[in-house]
Amino acid sequence: VQLQASGGGLVQAGGSLRLSCAASGLAFRLYGMGWFRQAPGKERDFVAAISRSGGRTYYADSVKGRFTISRDNTKNAVYLQMNTLKREDTAIYYCAADRYSTMHPGMVTADFDSWGQGTQVTVSS
């Protein structure tokens, strides 16, 4: 399984970014997908998750209403649309995949067995 995250960058507070994660080496439609983030000196925290079909999505309270996770099973890709960005959203963002875990709002890193390399998001004031 290979996951390649992209789309990060430097943006002003209030701006938007769209992250993408391209997956290969797996039957993508059979995997739940998630996004996590890790700020300097902090643990890797759950951001959003999406079910295998894309019919159910889950978010951390800190991003609810601002971020949207989606997937395209024909392109083996998952996305994270981030709007109204805040300085506290600054982190490295990682996409993750898991074949067997049921997606839910309280996902943790141990729920996912495949990880991408991360993409840096920096929000300036």
Image (spheres, rainbow, N blue to C red):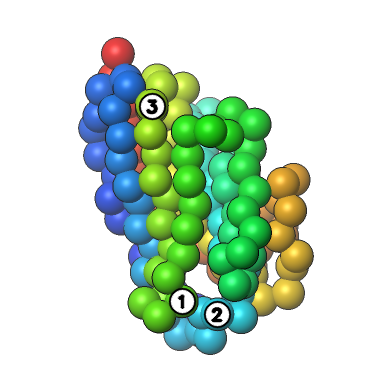
x then y, percent, for residue 2: 44, 74
For disc 3, the neighbor class at 10 Å (few under 14, some 14 to 19, many from 20) is some
Callouts 1 and 2 close, C-beta under 8 Å: yes
x then y, percent, for residue 7: 28, 50
Label 3 sits on a secondary structure element that is loop
Looking at the image, which is closer to me, 92 or 61? 61
x then y, percent, for residue 36: 54, 47
The kind of residue on which mark 1 rests is Asn
Q: Quadrant of residue 14?
A: top left
Residue shown at 31% from the left, 35% from the top: 16
Looking at the image, which is closer to me, 67 or 121? 67
Label 1 sits on a secondary structure element that is loop
Point out the residue furthest to the top here.
125
The kind of residue on which mark 2 rests is Arg
For disc 2, the neighbor class at 10 Å (few under 14, some 14 to 19, many from 20) is some
Instruction: Residue 117: tell me if it is visible.
Output: no
Q: Quadrant of residue 30?
A: bottom right
The numbered dot on residue 29 is 2
Residue shown at 53% from the left, 29% from the top: 41
Residue shown at 64% from the left, 49% from the top: 58
The numbered dot on residue 73 is 1
Label 2 sits on a secondary structure element that is helix
Residue shown at 72% from the left, 46% from the top: 105
Whichever of callouts 3 and 1 sits on the residue coming sooner in the sequence is 1
Q: Say which residue label 3 marks.
A: 84
Residue 87 left/right relative to 56: left
The kind of residue on which mark 3 rests is Thr
Looking at the image, which is closer to me, 17 or 118? 17
